[in-house]
Each structure stands twice: as structure tokens, then as C-alpha cells.
């Protein structure tokens, strides 16, 4: 087995996550404008709107001439109205704008030990890349979280023009990291995007899952703590 030269990491729910969850954040920002919405109802509406929006306009609307901000504005409005907000409410647009701006500037927190892991990977002189189904704000978000210096490259779905688990985004990552598939390890929290997808192109992968009881029985390589990535490099 060839030694690992390149480690790629998913970002959302692997390196960083939304503070309190989407439902919590949306409800707080809506409440500031006098709109009372239940966080769990928002979560359900968000999941539905996310699937619909991705089907209509994949890759944050990149192929349809939308900006990522336009894509998110539409999604947020669908989420809010799907959670019970009146679509005729004159505050709908302003609340959506606040939510979109908030997640471009705040709203994120570090996953425990993410910085320690990134430091350890760099100490091994490994090439480290971020490969994420994120929009064009990924680099700026990582910069604000003081994480950008740890990555040799950042590849978002928006930048690649393809989203995981499409093989093309992994191939672009290999080119950017100047490594072969057999020299690469990918780590992330999504079974399809971060575990099965990379393996289909020959990349070694590890599933990050905080609760060991949630790990599918057919998953050979998994970790419940990010620092355990080091066992695979």
C-alpha cells in the first residue's frame, strides 16, 4: 500500500458546523424581527427546500446563471414560508437578507479537535485540501475561522462545477494536490459524498461519525473523533 501524501477533508460537519443548528439560527434571526418560528419546524422545512432547490438549480445555481447569494435567498425564503411565515409579509426579504449575510460572516463554530488535526497533518508534511459541497464563500469562511492557512488548496462544489459524489470533483482535487488516488485519503461525515464516492475513484476514505452506533455495518473505516484520522496516515 502506498503511503498517504494528500489528505482531503470535507468541511461542513467535519471541520466546522452551524452554531446550534440551522433551525435555531433561523428562529433567532426571525424572532429579532418579531416572527416566531419553531426551530424543529424550520429544520424540516429547510431539508425539504434544500432538496427542491438542489434539484431545480444544482451547484448553487452556478450552471443556471445565478449567484450563490440569489440561490440562498430563494432557499431561505422557501424555508421561512414553509415554516409558517406569511409569504406576503413585508419583512420576508429583510429577514432572508440577514440570514444570508449572517452565514457569510458568522454562524459557524469549530468541530472539536479540528485545529489539532490540521496542525498534526501539516506537521507530517502532508498536502491538505478542503473538498466540500459549499458555495463560493468557502475560502472566506475558512479565513474568518482562522483555518485557511492549514489548507494547501480549497475546492468547493461551486469552484469545481461539480458536487460530491461526482467523480470529477475528486479528480480535480487529485490534480490540485498533485497526488494519485492511491496516495490520497479523504475524510468526511457523509456516507455517499465522503466515503463511497471517493472509493469509486480509488481514493481511500474514512467516515467521520460522532456516534459509533450510527456507523453502517458495511463501513470498514470510521472514526468518532477527528484526531483518529492520524491512525490512517
Image: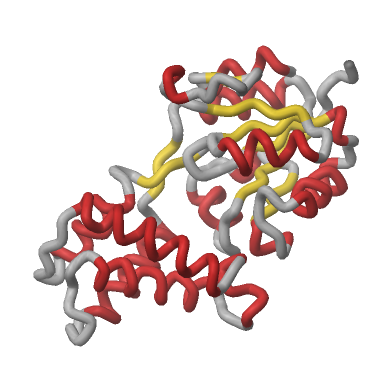
Which residue sits furthest front? 218
Give me the residue at 38% from left, 46% from top.
Answer: 18
Residue 33: image location, x then y, percent: 14, 71
From the viewer's side, name the closer residue of 162 and 4.
Answer: 162
Give me the residue at 50% from left, 23% from top.
Answer: 215
From the viewer's side, name the closer residue of 80 and 105.
Answer: 80
Residue 61: image location, x then y, percent: 58, 74
Q: Quadrant of residue 83?
A: bottom left
> Is 173 left, or right, of 41 in this rendering?
right
- Coloring applied to the structure: secondary structure
Give me the residue at 71% from left, 21% from top.
Answer: 123
Give me the residue at 25% from left, 58% from top.
Answer: 42
Q: Is residue 26 above or below residue 87?
A: above
**Which quarter of the image is occupied by the N terminus?**
top right
Residue 79: image location, x then y, percent: 31, 67
From the viewer's side, name the closer residue of 53 and 173.
Answer: 53
Q: Quadrant of residue 221?
A: top right
**Which quarter of the image is occupied by the C terminus?**
top right
Residue 180: image location, x then y, percent: 90, 35
Which residue sits furthest top? 231
Q: Is residue 125 above or below residue 174?
A: above
> Is 49 left, or right, of 148 in this rendering?
left
Amino acid at each position: 500500500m502506498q503511503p498517504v501524501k494528500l489528505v482531503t477533508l470535507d468541511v461542513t460537519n467535519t471541520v466546522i458546523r452551524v452554531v446550534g443548528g440551522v433551525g435555531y439560527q433561523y428562529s433567532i434571526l426571525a424572532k429579532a424581527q418579531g416572527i416566531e418560528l419553531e426551530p424543529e419546524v424550520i429544520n424540516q422545512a429547510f431539508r425539504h427546500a434544500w432538496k427542491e432547490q438542489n434539484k431545480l438549480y444544482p451547484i448553487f445555481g452556478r450552471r443556471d446563471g445565478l449567484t450563490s447569494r440569489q440561490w440562498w435567498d430563494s432557499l431561505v425564503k422557501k424555508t421561512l414560508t414553509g415554516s409558517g411565515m406569511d409569504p406576503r409579509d413585508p419583512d420576508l426579504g429583510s429577514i432572508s437578507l440577514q440570514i444570508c449575510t449572517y452565514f457569510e460572516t458568522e454562524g459557524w463554530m469549530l468541530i472539536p479537535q479540528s485545529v489539532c488535526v490540521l496542525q498534526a497533518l501539516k506537521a507530517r508534511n502532508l498536502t491538505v485540501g478542503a473538498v466540500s459541497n459549499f458555495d463560493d464563500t468557502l475560502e472566506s469562511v475558512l479565513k474568518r475561522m482562522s483555518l485557511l492557512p492549514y489548507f494547501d488548496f480549497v475546492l468547493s462544489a461551486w469552484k469545481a462545477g461539480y458536487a460530491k459524489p461526482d467523480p470529477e470533483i475528486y479528480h480535480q482535487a487529485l490534480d490540485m494536490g498533485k497526488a494519485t488516488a492511491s496516495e490520497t485519503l479523504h475524510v468526511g461525515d457523509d456516507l455517499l459524498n465522503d466515503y463511497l464516492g471517493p472509493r469509486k475513484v480509488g481514493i481511500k476514505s474514512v467516515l467521520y461519525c460522532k456516534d459509533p452506533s450510527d456507523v453502517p455495518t458495511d463501513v470498514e473505516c470510521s472514526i468518532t473523533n477527528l484526531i483518529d484520522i492520524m491512525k490512517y496516515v
